[in-house]
Image (tube, helix red, strand yellow):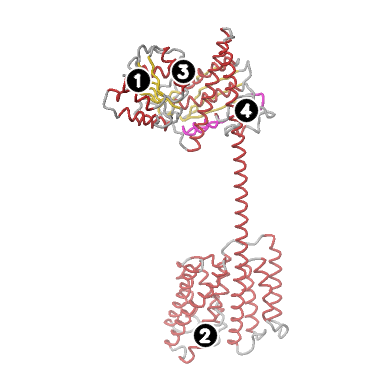
């Protein structure tokens, strides 16, 4: 309302029509920023200003309606065609805004002048002159004031270090404006005021340029009203119209120029961001490539080391020059290194499942003391051979959790194995089960080498081991603790590591939510004696494997159990054998050339003779859960992943053939 009163105080052609009308810019800017819901405020303000100035209630309502429709139309057109609140970021949107300002203000001028004429407050013959003054005042008000409203509601886009420069441009603009408009005849060329605006457009931004335009307009209007400046050439209305034309031209020139600079600056910044992103991606790709090379080198080392030991002992055993004790030690070494290789492969498979989000757990009630005991018994031989004392303390015997007993046993085995591996001979490793409120705690405490402070935050990361001076004194890919953390996370628990420093041991703490009473836990399978083989006397077994060594060793194992194995190197050979003989069971590989093991079992199950019901075991290097599910769906009774203990495979055959009871 104050702006309206100020504008009408400069009216001369008619009391309700002024060549200077800031409220149009205020209204359009407010609706662009705040939305169309602000239109009642525009309507009320316009009505109050007019009813307290001149005219009747009817004419004031008509003028207020025209002003409101003008603001609504302008704001809607800007939002629809000129980028909304971002209209001053691109030069084409600024030009669209100028066109919209010229069109939307015709609404107010037309309705306002018509209201005055219909109400008898303006002669019809004066309508054209009043309309022109009204429209030009509204247009320039929109061009000068609306940008100020919109831009000052947004964060600044120029650097803070340019604040001093901004103050300098402001002072120069005020000085030039005063010299041009307030000093009579001193600088009769008003376009001298343009350089500071161009400076602001190039160096500071659209907001600063719009601010200087408003300041310069205020100086020009105040001087012209007093008869000063290059535009004071006739009556007040004519002089103000000339000033408004000049300031409108300045606005339409400076604002698009500033928008061009802003747009190019934004493009340059986006190009810089894209370049930085590309450099970051390139660095990440190079790091990934190095990590892949390092991993392959480490994998080669970890695979070759046990293979070298196994190959060496196998060569010595083949020569037959070892005594009984050395032969036994050699066989144990070969077996131990093969188990190590199997563990490395299992860790790699688990890691790939973690990366793919496919590692899952089967939740059942489980006793933690049986989990810890089973894992400790599995680790005890390694601890004994290394001279490490392994202790188990059950302070919370009977603690139960909802989880996967096999995976939890894998977790405890991994942590215990790490503790034993990094504890020197004569040291001690303790596994303790305790209860802490609603959670069970499993602590694995060792007196070993400890963990350096700089490595402690990274112990659960992939491929992390305590390397010392480039040496890797222990086998392993550094995946065990990564898998531990993920498995514990799947169980809703946490795992942490603590150490007082190198040479001072370490403590790994696992926290798992306890199970409420009343749920019966599932048993956890304890380590079994894998040395005994069941009797399979006169059991006819068809062995199908394209690997001759695999076929031979299985045949030898089955013969030692009393079975009568028949071997086949392909699916076609196996089907031919089934056509000519009767078998009690079949053990088949999956990954064979040509027709694979899936094709074999589907063909067998589709037969019409007794062979269709033959018990079948899939014995394959495709050892993942998805592979097992696919094998069972294809028609196999059991799935075993290579390698497997001979006793486990032969016991499964005994159960399938009805020679033994399921355990």
The residue range painted magenta reads 481-504
Which residue does the numbered mark 2 point to in the structure image?
A: 132
Instruction: Please tell me in which quadrant of the rendered image residue 651 appears.
Output: top left
List the residue tagged with mark 4. Answer: 499
Location of the C terminus (image quadrant): top left
**If you read the primary sequence from the N terminus, does the residue marked by circle 1 or circle 3 appear first?**
3
Q: Badges 3 and 2: C-beta atoms under 8 Å apart?
A: no
Q: CA distance from mark 3 to mark 4?
A: 31 Å
Residue holding disc 3: 527
Q: Is residue 559 above or below residue 138?
A: above
Secondary structure category for the residue under label 4? loop
Identity of the residue furthest to the bottom in this view: 125
Disc 3 residue crowd, few under 14, some 14–19, many 20+, Cα 10 Å: few
User: At which x and y percent is residue 240?
Assistant: 60, 84
Looking at this view, is 192 or 92 the one in front? 92
Give the image location of residue 338, x and y in percent. 53, 21
User: What residue is disc 1 on?
Assistant: 585
């Amino acid at each position: 309302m104050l702006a309206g009163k100020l504008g009408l105080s400069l009216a001369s052609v008619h009391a309700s029509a002024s060549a200077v009308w800031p409220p149009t810019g205020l209204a359009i800017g407010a609706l662009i920023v705040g939305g169309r819901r602000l239109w009642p405020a525009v309507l009320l303000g316009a009505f109050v200003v007019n009813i307290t100035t001149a005219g009747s209630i009817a004419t004031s309502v008509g003028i207020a309606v025209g002003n409101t429709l003008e603001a609504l139309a302008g704001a809607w057109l800007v939002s629809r065609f000129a980028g909304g609140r971002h209209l001053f970021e691109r030069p084409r949107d600024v030009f669209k805004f100028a066109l919209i300002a010229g069109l939307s203000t015709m609404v107010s001028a037309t309705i306002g002048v018509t209201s005055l004429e219909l109400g008898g407050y303006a002669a019809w013959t004066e309508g054209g002159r009043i309309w022109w003054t009204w429209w030009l005042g509204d247009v320039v008000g929109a061009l000068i004031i609306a940008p100020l409203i919109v831009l000052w509601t947004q964060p600044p886009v120029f650097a803070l270090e340019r604040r001093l420069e901004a103050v300098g441009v402001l002072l120069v603009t005020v000085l030039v404006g005063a010299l041009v408009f307030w000093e009579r005849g001193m600088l009769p060329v008003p376009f001298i005021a343009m350089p500071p605006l161009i400076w602001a457009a190039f160096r500071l931004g659209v907001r600063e340029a719009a601010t200087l335009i408003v300041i310069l307009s205020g100086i020009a209007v105040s001087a012209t009203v007093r008869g000063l400046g290059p535009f004071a050439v006739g009556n007040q209305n004519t002089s103000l119209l000339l000033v408004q034309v000049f300031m409108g031209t300045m606005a339409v020139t400076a604002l698009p120029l500033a928008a061009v600079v802003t747009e190019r600056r934004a493009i340059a910044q986006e190009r810089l961001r894209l370049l930085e992103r590309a450099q970051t991606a390139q660095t990440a790709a190079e790091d990934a490539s190095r990590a892949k090379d390092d991993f392959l080198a480490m994998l080669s080392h970890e695979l070759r080391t046990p293979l070298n030991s196994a190959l060496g002992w196998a060569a010595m055993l083949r020569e037959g020059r070892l005594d009984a004790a050395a032969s036994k030690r050699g066989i144990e070494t070969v077996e131990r290194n093969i188990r190590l290789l199997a563990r490395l492969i299992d860790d790699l498979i688990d890691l790939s499942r973690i990366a793919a989000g496919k590692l899952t757990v089967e939740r059942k009630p489980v006793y933690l003391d049986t989990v810890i005991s089973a894992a400790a018994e599995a680790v005890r031989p390694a601890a004994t051979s290394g001279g490490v004392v392994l202790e188990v303390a059950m302070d919370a015997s009977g603690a139960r959790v909802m989880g996967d007993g096999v995976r939890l046993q894998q977790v405890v085995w991994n942590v215990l194995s790490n503790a034993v591996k990094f504890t020197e001979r004569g040291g001690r490793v303790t596994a303790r089960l305790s209860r802490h409120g609603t959670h069970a705690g499993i602590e694995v405490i060792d007196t070993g080498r400890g963990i350096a402070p700089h490595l402690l935050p990274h112990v659960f990361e992939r491929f992390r081991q305590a390397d010392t001076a480039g040496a890797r004194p222990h086998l392993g890919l550094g995946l065990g603790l990564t898998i531990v953390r993920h498995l514990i996370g799947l169980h809703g628990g946490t795992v942490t590591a603590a150490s007082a420093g190198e040479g001072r041991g370490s403590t790994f703490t696992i926290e798992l939510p306890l199970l409420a009473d009343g749920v019966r836990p599932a048993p956890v399978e304890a380590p079994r004696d894998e040395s005994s083989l069941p009797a399979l006397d006169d059991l006819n077994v068809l062995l199908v494997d394209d690997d001759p060594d695999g076929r031979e060793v299985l045949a030898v194992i089955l013969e030692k159990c009393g079975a009568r194995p028949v071997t086949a190197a392909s699916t076609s050979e196996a089907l031919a054998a089934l056509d000519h003989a009767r078998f009690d069971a079949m053990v088949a590989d999956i990954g064979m050339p040509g027709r694979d093991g899936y094709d074999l079992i589907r063909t067998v199950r589709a037969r019409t003779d007794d062979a269709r019901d033959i018990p079948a075991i899939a014995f394959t290097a495709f050892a993942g859960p998805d592979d097992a599910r696919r094998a069972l769906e294809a028609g196999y009774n059991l799935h075993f992943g290579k390698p497997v203990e001979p006793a486990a495979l032969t016991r499964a055959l005994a159960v399938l053939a009805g020679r033994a009871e399921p355990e």
